[in-house]
Each structure stands twice: as C-alpha cells, then as structure tokens.
Amino acid sequence: MSNYIDTHVHFDALRGIDAETALRKAVDGGVMRVVAVGGSIAANMSAVSLSAAHAGIVWPAVGYDRDCAGSSPPMADLEDCARQKGVAAIGEIGIDLHYSPDTETDQIALLESQLDLARRLCLPVIVHCRNAEEQVGHMLKCHSRLVAPTMSERIGVVHCFTGTAKFARVLLDCGFYLGFTGIVSFRAAEELRAVARSIPDKRILIETDSPYLAPVPFRGKPNEPCLLPFVAKALAEARSVSQDHIAEVTTRNAEMLFCPADAGKSS
Ligand SMILES: [Zn+2]
C-alpha cells in the first residue's frame, strides 16, 4: 500500500469525528503523517498539543490566518508557540480578498509580519491566496529572495492551489510548492487540471484541507484525512501517471518541506 502525507488538515474544525478517530482512520488508510494547521490562538494550541500526543505522525503549523487581520493578534504569543519543539511551519497565513476584501491592508501587514517571523525562525510557510495573486506573488517573491540561500527546498507551499498558470509560474520561480486538494477531482476544474499537469514532480503536494473540499465521490460531505488517496487519484489522472507515483513524489516533497530529517525514510 502506498504511503501518503496530508499536508493540510484543520483538526479544530472537523465535523462529526474527533481528531483521534480521524487520525486512526487516516493511518489505517495509508495516510501516515499529517500537517495540523493553525490559524488562530486556539487552533495553534490544539495543533501543537495534538502533535505532542502523536509525535512523528502529526506535524503542527502555527499562524494567524486572514480572519485575525484587524484584531492585532499578539505576535509575541505566536513566536512563543512557533518556537515550541516540533513546530514544522508557520501557517496557515495569507490573503483572501474573495471573502474579506475590506481588510486588505490589515491582511497584508499581518502576512508580512509572519513572513518575517518565518525568516527569523527558519521555518517554511503555508500560504492561502484567494483573489490576491498580485499581492501574494509580490510578497512571496521578496520573501523567497531573502530566504533562498538557506531554505532553498523549504521555503513554503501555497496550499489549495486554484490559481492561474501565470501565478503557478511565479510560485515555481520562487521555489514554492503547490498544494492540490479535492478540487482537482471536481468535474468543472478542467483549467486547474491543466495547470496541475504543468507543475514538475518536485513541486507538487497533496492535501485534504479537511473538513472542507471533500474529493469526488464524497463531494459536499465533511472531508477527512483518510480521503487523501482520492485526491492523489485525481491528480494522477490529470497528470497521466500512476497513483503510486503521486504518493511517492508528494511524500518525498512533504518530508523535504516540513521535516528534512525524515526525507527518504518512508520509501
Ligand atoms: Zn486551510
């Protein structure tokens, strides 16, 4: 059976299932490791404590997402949290002008201060971007120039990628990974599948973004990390390769990004 790594799970938002059960089902289904993303003070704390209880299986990420913009969340608290043992990334962070166009200035400032934190702590970033390719592209270009010498394969990922081919090119040039979700399995996502075909193996990651975006044939239901193989299957079909190949390269990439000491261990 192939091994998978789910690089984006909101354990604090799971519906109808607790984190322990979701993890057990994931591991039983070949999803051997997961990134538990934060985004608020509460989500960050729960990601860190889940990883303490499941060391080696759960990699925590901590950050303030765009919903925190405008409320001046305490950066010192985030830094304390990010310095805890095992924290694998700053995330999720980013800009969403689809849902929150009114707080653009605050979202930009919050993202900038967290990119700065990631640079100081030498941690990769997990970035959300919706209707903000111009702004995010510019900020990530600057960020990658500053960290590239030390963090070349570990700069970060733009998760749940649904952007244009042009934006994908900008991100690849910056050394970023692109995270693909169940959206690649949606019937209407032909444009996204075309972009997904053009990304080199060494830059793709897969994620469920649970509890959101369940892949076909579970579309519309609450998502869980154990459904990650369906994302791999859709991406494999889009790229005309085997599902095993997707499992292998995305596992290697996730290890490289989030835990370089683990690279190669699971193959
Ligand atoms: Zn997310």
Image (spheres, rainbow, N blue to C red):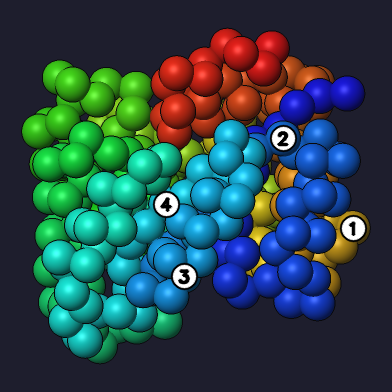
1 or 4: mark nearer the eye: 4
Q: Using residue 91 as the reference point, say whether residue 233 is left or right of it.
A: right
Q: Earlier in the sequence, mark 4 or mark 2?
A: 2
Disc 1 residue crowd, few under 14, some 14–19, many 20+, Cα 10 Å: few
Specify the quadrant that holds the N terminus: top right
Sequence-first tag of 3 and 4:
3
- Residue ID for mark 3: 43
Q: Position of residue 75 (x, y in %)?
A: 16, 67
**Quadrant of the image occupied by residue 144:** top left
What crowding class fits label 2: few (fewer than 14 Cα within 10 Å), some (14-19), or many (20 or more)? many
Compared with 208, 122 (above or below) is above
Q: Earlier in the sequence, mark 2 or mark 1?
A: 2
Amino acid type, mark 3: Ala
Give x and y (percent) for residue 51. 54, 49
Q: Nearer the viewer, mark 3 or mark 1?
A: 3
Q: Name the residue type under label 1.
A: Pro
Q: Few, some or many C-alpha atoms within 10 Å of disc 3 (few <14, some 14-19, many ≥20)?
A: many
Inter-mark Cα distance, 3 to 1: 29 Å
